[in-house]
Image (tube, rainbow, N blue to C red):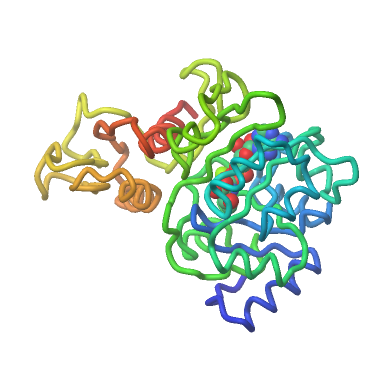
Amino acid sequence: MSVLPATPATLAAAATALRAGRLVAFPTETVYGLGADATNALAVARIFQAKGRPRFNPLIVHVARATAAWHLGASTALARRLADAFWPGPLTLVLRRTQDTPIADLATAGLDTIAVRCPAHHIAQALIDAAGCPLAAPSANRSGRVSPTRAADVAADLGDRVDIVLDGGPCAIGLESTVIDVSGATPILLRPGGVTRQAVEEVVGALRIATVGPERPTSPGQLASHYAPRAQVVLGLKGLQPGDAVLAFGPSPPRGPGEGPLINLSPAGDLVEAAARLYTALRELDATGAPVIRVAPIPGSGLGEAILDRLARAAAPR
Ligand code: TXA
Ligand code: MG
């Protein structure tokens, strides 16, 4: 595995590797993706192998421009409205697969729908253009672990399971894309993420919330463990012990410095800042060796919905 700063030469080398069926991790504005040629079944299979990901969990296919998306999945008025409003950006649309879609069945886990995203990050766009194919790319972490927001996170988690890591610095948003199913008449929120629900609802009206699905179990007790550090994550500060790590938020942290590891996601109480710091903070608190990470209350409005979604999964029983 080599970690390379993104330059015209390394982008060209990464594109060549992708066309040869290799895996390249690359930055997006949300998190780092583990990319492969989405039209090459063998390359896509390598993604599942590298992540240890269950094969029934489909991947997001990344395109450089919205027009490329409509070759892969059916464009509807609803899909176009969302694409016009949020692409390029942190939004994934689940579309009906087109009859002649060139995407490997494995990438969509045999479903008749396909998840497509047009990322805003200039390195992601340049890589897709240089490769000349859509890129299947889940977050570049082992299945179930914390998603990577820096090239070094990818290297530490995946090691030689990835061929090239393109380094584009830290991800600006720091949380995965919002996933919306627009394959039917009404849009369904499958995963809260970098575009807030309010912003989406301003464009298409009220969203239905999926009650079942890979990211939406029927009750909180069934939450699949995901985005999880090694330490136990506990929501709320009740029962705080001296050795516990604390993930704080807002101007009045629950305890002072020196009483154990504490990271404040945003002393100013800014949810955008908190989202950008969330995964790095979980990694850093985990690295202290504290057995438990306790999470202070965080408001659920705006990006808070996605932050709380990820923290609930990190806290789910394993
Ligand atoms: O921000 C992101 O979305 C990042 C970057 C790299 O683009 N990618 C990412 O991929 O988070 P991943 O594989 O970790 O999450 C993809 C999500 C999963 O929840 C998966 O179940 C859902 O999208 N998904 C993919 N295809 C789907 C489909 N056809 N129908 C419903 N859900 C789908
Ligand atoms: Mg992921």
Residue at x 26% of width, y 45% of height: 270
Residue extending farthest bottom: 9
Q: Nearer the viewer, residue 114 or 148?
A: 114
Q: Position of residue 205 (x, y in %)?
A: 52, 27
Is residue 224 something one can see in this rendering?
Answer: yes
Give residue 209's quadrant in the image: top right
Is residue 142 something one can see in this rendering?
Answer: no
Is 1 placed above or below 239 here?
Answer: below
Residue at x 19% of width, y 30% of height: 240
Give residue 59's quadrant in the image: top right
Q: Position of residue 199 (x, y in %)?
A: 45, 38
Image quarter for ligand 2 equals top right
Is 34 placed above or below 205 here?
Answer: below
What is the number of callouts on the image? Answer: 0
Q: Is residue 300 left or right of residue 54?
A: left
Q: Nearer the viewer, residue 114 or 166?
A: 114
